[in-house]
Image (tube, helix red, strand yellow):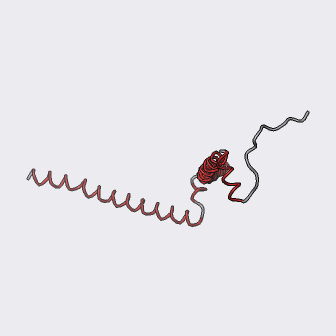
Amino acid sequence: MKEEEDMVQEGAPEEGGKKERGKSLKRAAEFLRNSTVAVLRGEFLIRLRFDRYFLHIIYLFFLAVMSIWIKLEIEKTMARMEDNKKVLEDCKIYHAQKTCELVSLDRVSTVQDLLEKAGSDLTVPDRPADRIR
């Protein structure tokens, strides 16, 4: 008999716990429904009293936008620098080729050959140039 009484006493708190759980679930569902309605109506931040911090929120939004904009500008500048590096490398190669051509044309024999191919009568001078004073 004592065992039956113990079982009855143990069963009573469980039923009360189920009722409390049901109430808490009901409250949670009501809270979610009210929050969803407040969000849809645009009242959620006012209910949480965020109107006091409105200027701070605007300031943080402005800072976030500026940060994103600056990062995009930096990325665009870096891309332009990479393109300019490629162009600069091409210019260096072109300059080296032209320098090599000029060095080869600087030789007297090469100049004589070019003059002969062009049909010119110019030749290498026999004596040094005179200075006019």
Q: Nearer the viewer, residue 111 or 5?
A: 111
Residue drawn at point x = 57 percent, y = 53 percent: 48
> On the image, which quarter does residue 117 sit in?
bottom right
Q: Nearer the viewer, residue 128 or 36?
A: 128
Extreme residue toward the right, this view:
133
Q: Number of callouts in the render?
A: 0
Q: Nearer the viewer, residue 20 or 103?
A: 103
**Relative horizontal placement of residue 94, taking residue 34 as reference (left or right):** right
Q: Is residue 115 visible?
A: yes
Residue drawn at point x = 32 percent, y = 59 percent: 19
**Relative horizontal placement of residue 23, taking residue 112 as reference (left or right):** left
> On the image, which quarter does residue 12 sit in?
bottom left
Residue 123 image offset from top left, x and y in percent = 74, 49
Residue 67 image offset from top left, x and y in percent = 62, 49
Q: Is residue 52 visible?
A: no
Q: Quadrant of the C terminus?
A: top right
**Relative horizontal placement of residue 125, taking residue 42 as reference (left or right):** right
Extreme residue toward the left, this view:
1
Residue 43 image offset from top left, x and y in percent = 59, 61
Extreme residue toward the front, this view:
126
Residue 59 image offset from top left, x and y in percent = 66, 48
